[in-house]
Amino acid sequence: MNGRPRFLTFEGGEGAGKSTQIRLMADWLAAKGIDVLLTREPGGSPGAELIRDLLLKGAVDRWLPISEALMLAAARADHIERTIRPALKAGKWVLCDRFYDSSVAYQGAGRGVGVTEVQTIQKIAFGDMRPDLTLILDLPVDIGLKRALAREGEKSDMEDRFERMERSFHETLRQAFLSIAEAETDRCVVVNADQGIEQLQQQLRGIVTDRSLLS
Ligand code: TYD
C-alpha cells in the first residue's frame, strides 16, 4: 500500500551522508510495499543529467554564480516535469537527493546571487513544487569536508567543483540551510549528521513516522 504519494528531499552540505541515508530510507519504504522513486539533483532526467556534467566538472571559476543559478533552475524544471510529477501521479513516493534548498544555499547564499533572487528565478522556472518533508543533515564543516575528501578516491569523474570551494563558502552554506529550516519548520527538520549511519537512519525514519506521512 502506498498511501498518499509523498515527496521527500534530503539536504545538507558536503559529506553529510545524504546519499547513504536516502538509500536506506528507500529500502525501508520499499519493504513496506511502497513504490519508491529515488532521484537526485542536479540531474534526475536525461536533460538535467547533461546540465549536471556542466555544473560539477571543471575549474572552480568555470561559471558565473548567476549562470549556475539559471542552469540549475533549467535542470530542475526538466526534472520536475519529466520525472518527479509523473512519478507522483503514478502513486509513487519520490525521494530526492538535494532539491531547491540547495540552490538557495549554494547559489543564493554561498555564491552570492542572493536568496530572494534565487527564489524568484525558481518561481519563474517551475512555480511551486513543495516537498512534503525536507530532512536537513547538519554537520560541522571540518567533519563534512574531511568525509568528502576521504570519498574523493571513489569518484572517477571529478564531480567535485563545489567541494573544492573555500572553507568560508561551506560555513555560509551551513548557516543558510539552518536559516531555511528556521523559516519553514512545517516542512524542514534539521538532524545532527555527526552520528553513526544506523542511528541517524533510525532518527530519520522516526521523523517520517511521527509526521504521519505513512498514513
Ligand atoms: P554531488 O556529487 O551529488 O554531491 P553531494 O553528495 O554533496 O550531494 O554533487 C552535487 C553538488 O552540486 C554539490 O556540491 C552541491 C551542488 N549543488 C548546487 O550548488 N546547487 C544545487 O541546486 C544543487 C542541487 C546542487
Image: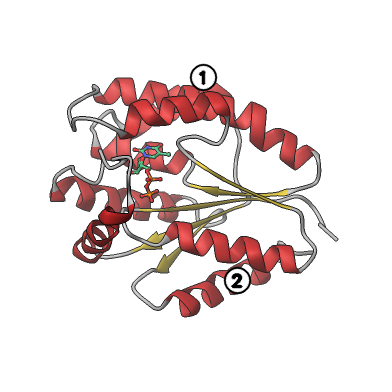
- Which amino acid type corresponds to the residue marked 1 in the rendered image? Ile
Mark 1 vs mark 2: give the one in front.
2
Ligand 1 resides in the quarter of the picture at top left
Q: Residue at x 75, y 48 (%)?
A: 92
Answer whether residue 120 is visible to the viewer in this image.
Answer: no
Residue 138 coordinates in the image, percent (x, y): 36, 63
The residue labelled by disc 1 is: 124
Residue 24 coordinates in the image, percent (x, y): 57, 66
Quadrant of the frame with the C terminus: bottom right
User: Can you say whether 56 is above or below 147 in the image?
Assistant: above
Q: Residue at x 65, y 65 (%)?
A: 27
Distance from mark 1 CB to nearest ligand 1 atom below 8 Å:
no
User: Can you say whether 187 is above or below 82 in the image?
Assistant: below
Circle on res. 75: none
Answer whether residue 54 is visible to the viewer in this image.
Answer: yes
Q: Nearer the viewer, residue 210 or 80?
A: 80
Circle on res. 205: 2
Q: Residue furthest right?
A: 1
Looking at the rendered structure, the secondary structure element under dot 1 is helix
Q: Earlier in the sequence, mark 1 or mark 2?
A: 1
Q: Horizontal placement of 86 versus 125: left or right?
A: right
Looking at the rendered structure, the secondary structure element under dot 2 is helix
Q: Horizontal placement of 151 versus 49: left or right?
A: left
Quadrant of the frame with the N terminus: bottom right
Within-10-Å neighbours for mark 2: few <14, some 14–19, many 20+? some
Calculate the distance from the C-alpha at mark 1 to the C-alpha at mark 2.
Answer: 34 Å
Q: Are marks 1 and 2 in contact (CB under 8 Å)?
A: no
User: Can you say whether 98 is above or below 113 in the image?
Assistant: below
